[in-house]
Amino acid sequence: MKEHLPLMVSDILSRKHFEQAIILAGEEGLNRIVKWVHVVEVTNIGNLLNGDELILSTGVAWKEDEGLFISILNQLVENQAAGLCIEMGTYLAEIPAEVIVIANKNKFPIIIFQKEVPFVEITQDIHTFIINNQHRKISDLRELYAQEKKRVEEIEWLQSWIEGEHPLDEINEYLLHHDSKPNSSEALVLVAKVHCIKEKCSQDGTYLKLLYRSVFEQNGFVLFSVEKRNELILILLNNRPNKNVKERVKKAILSIKDSEFIRKKGTTKLYMAAGKVVERLTDIHKSFQSAKETLRIQQEMSKEETYFYEDLHLYRLISHMSKHMDLQDLVVEYLQPVIHYDRKYNGKLLETLKVYLECNGSKQETANKLFIVRQTLYHRLQKLENLLGEDFMNHEKRIALEFMLLVKDYLSPQFLERKSI
């Protein structure tokens, strides 16, 4: 490619990751100028484009809807995008014939990758080339600077929103400016955290953000997102008049966790924690705080399948108690003899006590769940009576023991081990 000349789609084909790419349609438009590259996985894209952008996509937003695919293609043509690059296989198996006809008619290049490609690396490569070789005019660079400044300001605004610093009139003005005024004032915050291979975190995070947006919009939510440290915070505004917010959020979470992207990342652990649903947009910070608490309990207790704050029940009470008293001392007071015995003899009495209480004192059910014979269970129950007292199944003491077992689960094991019990 020659320096200081406009970068064209045909030039892009010689870049890294395009070696095996195929020009499927619009070959007469390979002389279109490329000023920037965008990854797009949403259905309403008119406000995202300034013209001359090369679009990268997996097609997740329209994978089962040919009409939606055609609508998106028409938006790209109308907004003078440079071309569309699609990764095949992940969400799309073929390109509809009507799409090819429209692309050829408008001399709009459609380029396909026949295997997964790293969109993040592609955009970094092309953006670096454009800037280093001064392919953009000074006015374009100023525009880029203004766009980056605007992006930073928007992130700061969203961070202030989740901290509860904006009044209602400012929030409404922000939503109107983004053409995102929802049909309801219900909202919640969902915190997502992914544990992945370090060098792939950035790429995975980019894909996940696109996946979140597509799935939650399909389930009736207006979504805003902001990254904070190593977490992605999603502000979900209910955009449907019906009240089944929790059911739709859970459906979206399960859809994301069951997506091909997540299943392909077998070693990736994804936490998604939803805060309580609030009735006022000025209370977003309350949902954010409860979402953080839900995430903390998920991680500390391996309860990643409990997605909602209100489903934590007694653990919420335990969490509040832990801020005002030493819960470890309580655990020691009630369970010290059993913990001490298990450590000394590997007696599995604590596990037996927990299952026995869960089974409401049914010996047969307890033995079955523990995969032991009843004689072994009788021996363990006798040990428990000796250590806890014959009245350990009496109503009040039983409730106290059940609660202490939950407290023990809540507390990090390393803290409990510091106690001399």
Image (spheres, rainbow, N blue to C red):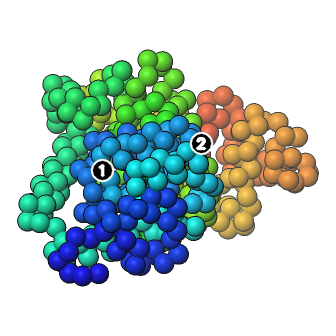
Give residue 44's position: percent from left, percent from top: 37, 39
Residue neighbourhood size for the residue with mark 1, other residues' Cα within 10 Å, grouped as few (<14), some (14–19), many (≥20): some
Which residue shows up at 24% across the image and 63% down it?
35
Q: Residue 327: in sight, yes or no? A: no
Which residue occupies 76% across, 37% down? 359
Residue at the image point whose x is 17% and y is 77% from the top: 4
Q: Which residue is mark 2?
A: 64
The reply, left or right, for residue 365 in relation to residue 415 is right
Q: Secondary structure at mark 2?
A: loop
| Image coords of residue 43 (percent x, y) | 42, 41
The quadrant holding residue 89 is bottom right
Which residue does the image show at 36% across and 31% down from the upper left? 237
How far apart are labels 1 and 2 at the CA level?
25 Å
For residue 161, side relative to residue 359 (left or right): left
Q: Position of residue 161 (x, y in %)?
A: 22, 38
Please tell me whether residue 132 is drawn above or below residue 398 in the rendered image: below
Q: Earlier in the sequence, mark 1 or mark 2?
A: 2
Front residue of 316 and 420: 316
Determine crowd level at label 2: few under 14, some 14-19, many 20+ residues with C-alpha closer than 10 A. Answer: few
Q: Position of residue 291 (x, y in %)?
A: 40, 41
Q: Amino acid at mark 2?
A: Glu
